[in-house]
Image (tube, rainbow, N blue to C red):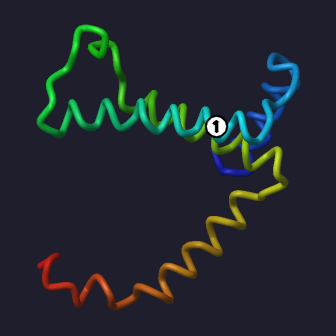
Amino acid sequence: MTLEEAQKQVDEWIKTYGVRYFSELTNMAILTEEVGELARVVSRTYGDQSFKKSDLDANLADEMADVLWVLICMANQTGINLTEAFEKNMLKKTDRDKTRHLENEKLK
C-alpha cells in the first residue's frame, strides 16, 4: 500500500464510519496520546521498566499503526500529500546529512 492509498483509505473510513474528522487540535492531542502509548510499549519491551498487568496486551505494531492513523488523519484534513512531503523530507535529510552520520565517531 502506498501512502496515497493509505490516505484515501483513511478518508473513506472517516466518511463511512467516523462521521467527520475530529478538529486538528483534537487530533494533535490524540497523536500525542498515541505516541505516549507507543513509548510505553517501547520502554517496557526494550528499556528497563517491566510490564504492568494492564500493559500485557500491548502490541508494538498496533501502537505504531495508531500513530500512523492519526498522522494520516491530520494530513488529510490539512491538505498534505504525505507522499510528496515524505519525498521532499528525504531529499532534505540526504542533502543535510549525507556525510554527517558517516563522520560521527560515536556511531563507529
Say what secondary structure mark 1 lies in: helix
Amino acid type, label 1: Val
Above-or-below relation of 88 to 26 = below
Residues packed near mark 1 inside 10 Å, few (<14), some (14 to 19) or many (20 plus): some
Q: Quadrant of the N terminus?
A: top right
Q: Is residue 108 left or right of residue 62?
A: left
Q: Position of residue 62 (x, y in %)?
A: 45, 27
Q: Is residue 75 left or right of residue 90?
A: right
Q: Nearer the viewer, residue 93 or 34?
A: 34
Count of numbered labels shown in the rendering:
1
What residue is at 34 percent from the left and 20 percent from the top? 58
Q: Residue at x 65, y 41 (%)?
A: 28
Residue lying at the far top of the rendered structure: 53
Q: Where is residue 108 shown, x and y percent of the image? A: 11, 79
Does residue 11 appear left or right of residue 67 in this picture?
right
Tell me: residue 45, above or below residue 80: above
User: Closest to the observer: 36 or 20?
Assistant: 36
- Residue 74 percent location from the top left of the image: 73, 44
Q: Residue 49's x, y, as percent? A: 15, 30
Which residue is at 82% across, 44% downward? 77
Q: Is residue 72 left or right of residue 44?
A: right
Q: Which residue is mark 1?
A: 70
Q: Is residue 58 above or below residue 33?
A: above
Residue pictured at 24% horizontal, 36% vertical: 43
Q: 6 or 56: nearer the eye?
A: 56
Q: Quadrant of residue 68?
A: top right
